Image: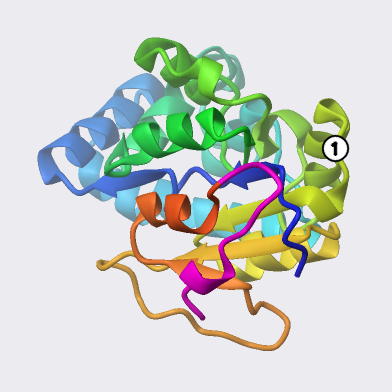
Amino acid sequence: MNTDIRVIFVDLGGTFRVIRDDLEYKNAAKAKIAELLGAEGDPVQFFDTVIDKRYDVYRDWCLRFMCEAPEEMLWTRWLAYDFPKDRVKAAAKELTYAYRRTKGERVVVDGGIETVRELRSRGYTVGIISDLVGKHEVDEWLDHDGIRDLFDTVQQSSITYIRKPNPAIYFYAMEELGVEAENCCYVGDNLNRDIIGAKAAGFGMTVAVEYADMKPLKLTEENMPDAKVITFDQLLDIFPARGQVALDKMIKP
């Protein structure tokens, strides 16, 4: 592990953004998908038995090739291939938005914005590296919440078409910022994607999040992070100033 950390990259889903479970919210999104496709019958059942099952097949493909498909292809090839292609392509953006909402409402983790602002005030460069479908949601969310200025780079698998743990998506982020891997730390919730990928990219440090509502980390030699945090704002204990790491404040995984 390197203690000369100058850049902190964070994951989005499960790390900087978490899901607020709301059945009405999720079912409304499922109904929207059925409406956009013109599917008949119970929209919730249609989603649960058709769309979500097909997404499992798509996800297997993603994990096998460490790749993300363009959202039009996601819907025309995997999720809604038996609906009129022109209709599906025209609605692809809205369909992807709706699909993401079927999992719950995404909100910034408690203390997330304040923590990133403080890290920046301490001299750290902060960026995002995240796997997700849909090209537009993250940019629109950053603009809507007025927090785009908090992140010096935003790398998304939906833009690069590369998914973690492929180190290439980390390379893109480093190249954009002009930084060295040994001076970078990655913070994420998925050991087998986030941590293994950052290690493969040569990052100087990795931190896993283990929030109270998460399952315990399943650690192996390969996916072992250097530290963990129980709350996002504990990053402030570890990173006192650019180029420094408070070793005595680190929580062992």
- Coordinates of residue 201 in the picture (x, y in percent): 84, 57
- Coordinates of residue 43 in the picture (x, y in percent): 23, 38
Q: Is residue 230 visible?
A: yes
Q: Is residue 246 magenta?
A: yes
Instruction: Tell whether 4 sits left or right of 77.
Output: right
Q: Relative to the observer, which residue lies in front, 65 or 1?
A: 1
The picture quadrant where one finds residue 71 is top right
- Coordinates of residue 94 in the picture (x, y in percent): 44, 19
Instruction: Tell whether 2 sits left or right of 188.
Output: right
Q: Residue furthest left?
A: 24
User: In what quadrant of the picture does the N terminus appear?
Assistant: bottom right
Sort mark 1 into few (<14), some (14-19) or many (20+) by Cα contacts within 10 Å.
some
Q: Tell me the amino acid under the disc marked 1.
A: Val
Q: Residue at x 76, y 37 (%)?
A: 161
Q: Residue at x 35, y 66 (%)?
A: 230
Q: Relative to the observer, which residue lies in front, 85 or 166?
A: 166
Q: Is residue 42 visible?
A: no
- Coordinates of residue 232 in the picture (x, y in percent): 38, 52
Using the image, determine if residue 65 lies above or below residue 156.
below
Q: Which residue is mark 1?
A: 179
The picture quadrant where one finds residue 84 is top right
Instruction: Tell whether 165 sits left or right of 57.
Output: right
- How many numbered marks does the figure carry? 1
Q: Which residues are magenta?
A: 241-253
Using the image, determine if residue 214 lies above or below residue 77.
below
